[in-house]
Image (tube, rainbow, N blue to C red):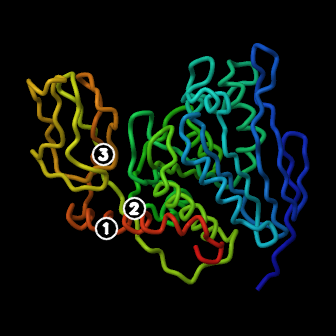
Amino acid sequence: MARAKKNNAIDIGGETIQAGEHASLELEMARLYTHAPLNVSIEVLNGKLEGPILLVCAAIHGDELNGIEIVRQILAKVDTEKLRGTLIAIPVVNVFGFIHKSRYLPDRRDLNRSFPGSERGSIAGRMAYQLFNEVISQCTHVIDLHTAAIHRTNLPQIRANLDNEGAAEMAKAFAAPVMVDAALRDGSLRAEAEAIGIPVITYEAGEALRFEPYAINAGVRGVIRVMRHLGMLRQSRRALPYQPVTARATRWVRAEADGIFRSHIALGERVTKGQILGIISDPAGSNEVEIKASQSGILIGQQTLPVVNEGDAVFHIAFFSQSDELIEQHLEGYLDQVRDDQDDELRWGIGTL
């Protein structure tokens, strides 16, 4: 068996991180109209031995907070001395949005629709350009951490281009309960990274502006599993607790009236065609309108705000080749485990994952 080679140094933002070093960097992404720099904090763990270069990033949308805590816990658990390859961790990509509890940037643009960016563009374009050229282009793999948008919540799930072999293998290794074969969107980190040969998976779990222990717990476990799959950490003897299932399609059920919305189901539950999923009424409870499932499937996302307008997307249902009953049992077991274990996860050691 060939001896592993010594890792290379890596350069980010004019800083050189040697093999075996852990560095904390500040990368200037743009400037505000006050001339104040808009910096992003980057942690680089450069292992002594060569291996993949993995980027784990969170809060590209500044109000999506669960990923920030996932990154913090990953950094607390990974020992540079035992790491092969390089882990680049960015807890908060969209610093401006994070400060203002907003998804967007000052130009009201979505950073995750602005890649690969432009050196002379708007603030979104400039930030995307800096991140893409200084960090993403040097990576071999990327895990992008997200939540649902504000006033919505998502069941833990991986979204990836499953036609990309590298992304599909990462998605399976992450072992979230559900994988969604998601189309690439122009300007997204996923699309532009894959265009230059870098596989990317997106983890979606929970709600914006919240810390949700079950979603954080599942995310930390998943990132560590991917790092083990890539050979960056010592392999575990434990088998994957769940084999993820792939949704063959997903569809949103929309509100057919304006009013006060009351949900009758929870994430991970099985729904049947014609089932009443929720009720919309006026504040006094009259003129009730039922929201019914148009097809059978499993609920993987829903609106949490109890006020809706006609046409709002309120329930996100996934459809599977396997029976819905088996999928529901699979999801119940997964959610029970991550919720039961969430207090213990605060005391995890790297060897117990």
Q: Report x, y in % for residue 254.
A: 24, 32
Please state the horizontal and vertical placement of residue 160, each as a whole percent of the image: 48, 50
Q: Marks 3/1: CA distance?
A: 18 Å
Residue 312 higher or lower than 237, as above or below: above
For label 3, count other residues whose C-alpha is less than 10 Å away and answer few (under 14), some (14-19) or many (20+): some
The residue drawn where x is 34% and y is 37% is: 304
Residue 176 % position (x, y)? 45, 61
Question: Residue under circle 1?
Answer: 330
Closer to the camera in the image, 303 or 326: 303
Q: Mark 1–mark 2 contact, CB under 8 Å? A: yes
Instruction: Return the residue found at the far front.
Output: 284
Label annotation for residue 251: none
Q: Which residue is mark 2?
A: 177
Q: CA distance from mark 2 to mark 3?
A: 15 Å
Q: Quadrant of the image for the C terminus?
A: bottom right
Residue 250, numbered label? 3
Kind of residue sitting beneath label 2:
Pro
**Which amino acid type is marked by label 1?**
His
Could you tell whether 26 is left or right of 89 in the image? Answer: right
Quarter where residue 115 is shown: top right
